[in-house]
């Protein structure tokens, strides 16, 4: 772990990620393997003027034990204090950071039904907490830190030490951190490019998008009226600009929950609840998944789609050029944070209210009336390829090329 680059990474997470304000509280949820990096973040946060920094650690090995030995009734119980401790700080304006260190197949031998019961219970109980990030009521961000098991999956032909070093180097490149260059300046310049692309897409105000490629994807995605494209940085409801994902290469908007038709074929594996789902596809009719299959992880996929009545509908459509830095790295990272930024992707479940004009001020019922999907889940999956073509239909019925051979042409 290069200490200089790690310190720069921690500073980026604090200053560009959550953009911590003076006297603001920072809530950190971190995987147990990230202790050393988390300490750097805490130090950077206090140096930036944090009022208080609170860290909650998680451990995938302990999580696996819970799924193996707890009964379904216990897994379905969520105590008020587990939610209230977060809400107490969020209501007072705290910002949030998630420091992940993925174990992509940590829960592969656990019962998918048990995991679904727990996920559903936590999502239902934590709906108000989730709204703080989905609606950007406060600043939030996600960053990733390597561990040996994850590194071995990404670089299976290297020694453990070499694989870990390689993964660190790939992460630094993906988040644009290099010695002698201030990453805050780099990210500011990149954000200006994002805003230019977003403005162009918003000007077109496409009614729907048509995706095709050689894998078999032929999908028509209707967009909600008065949709808004996002990408790069966002502005929280408290007026503070922040970057929710480090890294990021996407621009995204909100599909109409009832206006998606056709077939989409995944181009990369999906990691969900500690399981790998490979070689899968969905067929949509009137906005809902009506047929699906997977060569690996089908039962996990089945439980995900059954999470609630809206989990079979889309909540996000995202455009990512094939020549993005993460895609060109050639790595399959086995974690959505990176893989979604190497490929065009969709998300099943909730949409971001910010992708609708005035959406953050609407109730769930009002959002649904506008065509915005509301769900307990938000699960991204990748379908972009080097030969992806995307066209957008304007209000006048004109079709405009957006992507040709995997990259933007507008």
Image (cartoon, rainbow, N blue to C red):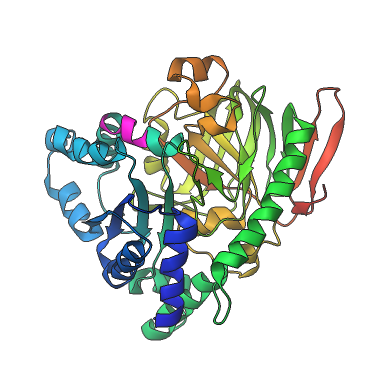
> Residue 123 vs residue 81: left or right?
right
Q: Residue at x 47, y 35 (%)?
A: 237
Q: Nearer the viewer, residue 335 or 223?
A: 223
> Percent from the top left, x then y, of residue 310?
45, 25
Q: Is residue 27 above or below residue 333?
A: above
Magenta segment main secondary structure = helix
In front of the other: 29 or 168: 29
Image height check: is 120 above or below 147? Answer: above
Q: Position of residue 377 (x, y in %)?
A: 40, 35
> Which segment is the magenta one?
125-130
Q: Would you place residue 339 above or below residue 159 in this image?
A: above
Image spot of residue 396 (x, y percent): 86, 22
- Asked if the stretch drawn in magenta spans residue 241, the answer is no
For the residue pair 193 and 352, the one nearer the viewer reads as 193
Residue 219 sits in which quadrant?
top right
Q: Residue at x 42, y 36 (%)?
A: 137
Give x and y (percent) for residue 306: 38, 29
Q: Residue at x 46, y 73 (%)?
A: 8
Q: Quadrant of the N terminus?
A: bottom left
Tell me, yes or no, if residue 2 can be seen here. no
């Amino acid at each position: 772990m290069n200490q200089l680059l790690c310190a720069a990474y921690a500073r980026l997470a604090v200053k560009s990620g959550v953009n911590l304000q003076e006297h603001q509280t920072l809530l950190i949820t971190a995987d147990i393997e990230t202790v050393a990096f988390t300490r750097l973040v805490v130090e950077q946060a206090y140096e930036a003027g944090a009022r208080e920094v609170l860290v909650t650690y998680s451990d995938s090995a302990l999580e696996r034990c819970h799924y193996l030995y707890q009964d379904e009734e216990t897994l379905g119980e969520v105590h008020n204090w587990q939610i209230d401790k977060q809400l107490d700080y969020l209501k007072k304006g705290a910002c949030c950071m998630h420091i992940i260190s993925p174990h992509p197949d940590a829960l592969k031998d656990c019962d998918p039904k048990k995991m679904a019961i727990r996920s559903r219970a936590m999502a239902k109980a934590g709906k108000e907490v989730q709204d703080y990030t989905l609606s950007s009521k406060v600043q939030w961000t996600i960053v990733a830190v390597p561990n040996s098991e994850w590194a071995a999956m990404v670089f299976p032909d290297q020694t453990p030490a070499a694989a870990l070093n390689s993964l660190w180097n790939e992460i630094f490149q993906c988040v644009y951190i290099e010695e002698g260059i201030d990453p805050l300046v780099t990210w500011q310049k990149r954000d200006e490019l994002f805003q230019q692309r977003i403005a162009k897409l918003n000007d077109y105000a496409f009614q729907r998008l048509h995706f095709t490629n050689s894998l078999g994807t032929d999908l028509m995605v209707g967009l909600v009226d008065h949709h808004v494209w996002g990408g790069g940085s966002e502005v929280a409801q408290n007026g503070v600009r922040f970057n929710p994902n480090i890294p990021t290469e996407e621009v995204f908007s909100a599909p109409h929950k009832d206006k998606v038709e056709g077939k989409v074929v995944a181009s990369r594996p999906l990691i969900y609840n500690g399981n790998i789902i490979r070689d899968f596809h969905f067929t949509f009719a009137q906005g809902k998944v009506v047929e699906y299959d997977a060569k690996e992880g089908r039962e996990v996929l089945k439980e995900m789609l059954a999470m609630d009545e809206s989990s079979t509908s889309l909540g996000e459509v995202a455009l990512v050029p094939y020549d993005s830095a993460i895609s060109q790295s050639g790595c399959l990272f086995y974690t959505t944070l990176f893989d979604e930024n190497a490929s065009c992707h969709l998300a099943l479940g909730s949409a971001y209210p910010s992708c609708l004009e005035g959406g953050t001020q609407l109730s769930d019922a009002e959002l649904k009336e506008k065509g915005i999907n509301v769900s307990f889940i938000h699960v991204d999956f990748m379908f972009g390829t080097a030969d992806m073509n995307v066209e957008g239909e304007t209000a006048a019925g004109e079709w405009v090329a957006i992507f040709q051979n995997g990259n933007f042409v507008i």
